[in-house]
Image (cartoon, helix red, strand yellow):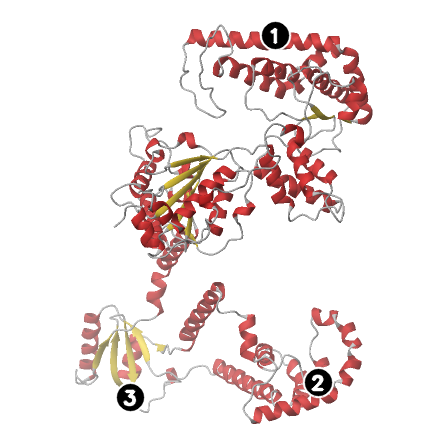
Amino acid sequence: MGLLSVSVGPFRSRVWAVRTWIRDLSTISATFHNGCALASKASLIQRRRGGLYQHILPLARLLSSNKPPRGFEKFFPKSEESAGVNKSAEDENSKEQETLVREERDTNDDGDQRRKGGKKEESHWWTRFQDDFPLDEKAVRYFAIGAAGMTSAFLYFYFRETGMQISWKDFVQHYLNKDLVDHLEVVNKQYVKVIPAHGVNTSEVSYLWFNIGSVDSFEHNLEMAQQEMGLDSQKVPVFYSSESDGALLFNFLPTLLLVGFLLFAMRQGPMAGGQRGNPFSMSESKAKVIKGNIGIQFKDVAGCEEAKLEILELVNFLKNPRQYQDLGAKIPKGAVLSGPPGTGKTLLAKATAGEANVPFITVNGSEFQEMFVGVGAARIRDTFATARKNAPCILFIDEIDAVGRKRGRGNFGNQSEQENTLNQLLVEMDGFNSSTNVVVLAGTNRADVLDPALMRPGRFDRHIYIGPPDIKGRASIFKVHLRPLKLDTSIEVEALARKLAALTPGFTGADIANVCNEAALIAARRLNQHVNTKHFEQAVERVIGGLEKKTQVLQLPEKTTVAYHEAGHAVAGWFLEHADPLLKVSIVPRGKGLGYAQYLPKEQYLFTQEQLFDRMCMMLGGRVAEQVFFRRITTGAQDDLRKVTQSAYAQVVQFGMNEAVGQMSFDLPQQGDLVTEKPFSEPKAQLIDQEVRLLIDAAFQRTLQLVTDKKEMVEKVAKRLLEKEILDKADMVELLGTRPFQEKSSYEEFVEGLGEFAEDTSLPEGLKNWNKKKGKGKTPAESTKLLLGGS
C-alpha cells in the first residue's frame, strides 16, 4: 500500500497559497465598505510577498471609485502624472474647503438616490473598463479572444485530472492480486485506466494507469495473470473508450500555425483581394460610390470653361432628359478628359461628383490589373454591375490608359490579361450587355496610346482636351486659390491675380495652386501676419527655378564664370528681336543650376523660323560668352545645348523648315521610348544630322558676332552680377539702355485685342438651370431610359 501515498509537500504549498489568497481577498473586499480598513490594512498587505494583493488591488481600484477615500491618498503610490500636478492641487485647497458643505449635501443626495435605485453621478466601473478597453476595435477583440483561448487552455491542462502512472508489474502485484480493482478501461487502445474498488485510498487520485503495446497482447496477459492467480477471467470487467486530449492538438499545431500564417499573408499582402483583404473577393470591384457632397464644386474649377460646359451638359442630360428627348437627342455614353498632368481633369471629375446630385462612381484604371488571370475582367463586370444598380449615374475611370492601351503591342503573339480586361470593358460600354443609363467619364495623360475601338463614337463619344490655361484662365485660377489666403489689406485680389497670371506663362492649375501654397509657407516661415506681393514673387521663382541655395559655396573662378555665362544670355536676349523679355537674372544657385534667369514668354501658339532661330541664339549666349572672355568652355552649358539640339531637330524633322530635307514631317522619339527602326532611310538620317549641325553652327556664329560686338556691355553686366548677385529689369535698363524692341509685360498688354479682360464664364441658355430638374411626369430614371432608347 506504500504506492498509494504521494508526497504531500506540493499539496500543502497549494493549500497555504489558497489560504493566503482568501485572507487577502477578505481584506481587500473590506475596503469597498470601509475606507478606514483600507488605510489600516494597506501597509500590512504590502509587506506580504507573493500574495494576491499585487494582482487584485488594481482590479479593486478599477471597480471602486476613481479616487481613494478622502484622507488616504498618502497610502497609495503617486504616479508621474499626479506628481506633476501637486502644485495645482495645493492651489485648490481653499476651493475644496469652500465646497465641502456642498459635497456633503451631494453625498446625502447620492445616498438617497442609491436607496431609490438611482445611478451615481460618478462613472460606473463598466464604463471606465470600456474606455480603457474598447471592444469595438478589431485589435482589442482579437486580443481578448486570444487571451480567453489561452486562459481556457491553461486552465484545462492545469486542473484536469491526470491520475498516477504505474507499471504492469505493480498493477498485477499490488492491485489485481489483492482484489483492489473495480474495473479496467482501455482508452484509445494506448493505455489502461485502473479504477480502484470502492473504499480504496489512492492518494488523492481517482484512477491509476499504465501503457500497453496493443489490445490483443493486453487481453492475453490479463487472462494469463488471472489464471496464474486462480481468478475467474471475468472477475475484472474491461471496457473500451475513446478520449481526446491535448496530444492531438499538439500534433496538428505546426500545421495550424502554417495555415494561419498563409491566411494572414494573403489578407495583408498583394494577394489580398477585395476591399476587406479577403482573398476570395479578388474579383470584387474596388469602385467607390459617392452620393454625398465631397466639398468641391464647379465654382472651384477655373481656367477650362469649355471643358466645364461639356461636363455640365452631361449632368444636365441625366437631370433633365426631356429637354433633349423632345429633339430626338441621345445622351453620349462617355467622354474622355485628356491633357497634360495638372490641368484639372480629376478636379473636374470631383466637382461633378460634388454637384451632380446623381450617384458618382469612381475607380482607378490600375485597380483592374492583377497578376491572376481573369481578375481584371471580373472587376470590370462587377464595376458596371454596381453602376447599373445605381443608375442613372456617372462612372469615372481615372488613368484609363492603364487598362485601355492599344492591343497587339508587346504580347509576342500571346493573349495578355490586359487584352482580356480591355475586351470586357469594350463589351460593357457598347455591347449586348451594355448599360444605357450609365455615363462613363475617363481621365488620361496619354490619349495617344488608347485603343481605337475604345475611342470610337458609341463608347467615348466626346474627346475633351484640357490643356494649360491661357493668361485669362490663369487669372481665374489664381482668384480661386487666393480665396482662402490671408492677404495683406493693401492687396486687391483682381489686380494680384492678373499680375501673377502675366508672370506665370505655361503654368497649369496644379502649378498655380503650388505657387499660392508656397507663398503662404514663405510668409509663415518669416512670421508675417499676411501674405504680400513679395511672397508671391518669391514663390514663382521657387517653382520655376527650384530651391535657392544661398549656402552653396562657389570658388571665385567658378562664380566669375557663372556671372559671365548669365551675362551672355541676358545681353544676347536683350538685343535679339524675337527673344523673350528678361525679367530677372541671378548667380545665386537654384535647383540643379548655378545661375538663374527668368524670362517672360509671350502667349504664342505659332512660331516662325526667325523666331525659333533667335531663341536658339539666346540659349547659346552663355557658351559664347565663356569662349569670348575665357578662351575655354565649361560643362555649365549642357542644358542650353540640349534645348538647342531639340529645337534644331524639331525644325528640320517635324516642322519642315529645311530646304534640303524638304517639306516632310516625322515623329521624334520621346525620352525613354524604345526605337527599333527609323521612319526614314539611312541617307535621309545622315542628311538630317548634317542640316541640324549646319543650323546650330549658323546660330553659334551669329551669337558669337553679337557677343563680340557687345563685349563691353556683357562685361558690365557680369561685374554688376558679381557685386549684387541679382539684377532685375530696372538694373538691365540702367546698364544696357532701353531695349530696342517693343515688349509686353503687363496683363492688360497681353490681353489687348482679345476682347474682354476676364475669362468668359457665361452659360448657354439651355444650361443656365443645369442643376435644377424641369418638368413633371416620369421619374429621372424612366426618362433617361426612354431618352437613351432603353425599354
Q: Which mark is residue 484?
A: none
Looking at the rendered image, the disc whose residue lies closer to the viewer, 1 or 2, is: 1
Tell me the crowding category of disc 3: few under 14, some 14 to 19, or many 20 or more residues within 10 angstroms, Cα based: few
**Residue designated by label 3:** 197
Residue 221 figure quarter: bottom left
Asked whether 657 or 114 is in front, the reply is 657
- Percent from the top left, x then y, of residue 589? 71, 29
Residue 752 figure quarter: top right
**Residue designated by label 2:** 70
| Circle 2 SS class | loop
Rounded to the nearest angstrom, the CA distance separating label 2 from label 3 is 63 Å
Residue at horizontal 37 percent and vertical 77 percent from the top: 162
Q: Relative to residue 411, is residue 557 drawn left or right?
A: right
- Percent from the top left, x then y, of residue 278? 38, 55
Q: Which mark is residue 698?
A: 1
In this rendering, is residue 263 above or below 107? above
Are the residues tagged 2 and 3 within 8 Å (C-beta)? no
In this rendering, is residue 328 above or below 195? above
Q: Relative to residue 682, is residue 741 drawn left or right?
A: right
- Percent from the top left, x then y, of residue 282? 35, 50
Looking at the rendered image, the disc whose residue lies closer to the viewer, 2 or 3, is: 2
Residue 98 figure quarter: bottom right
Q: Relative to residue 146, is residue 94 drawn left or right?
A: right
Rounded to the nearest angstrom, the CA distance separating label 1 from label 2 is 98 Å
Q: Relative to residue 392, is residue 765 drawn left or right?
A: right
| Circle 3 SS class | loop
> Which amino acid type is shown beneath numbered disc 3?
Ala
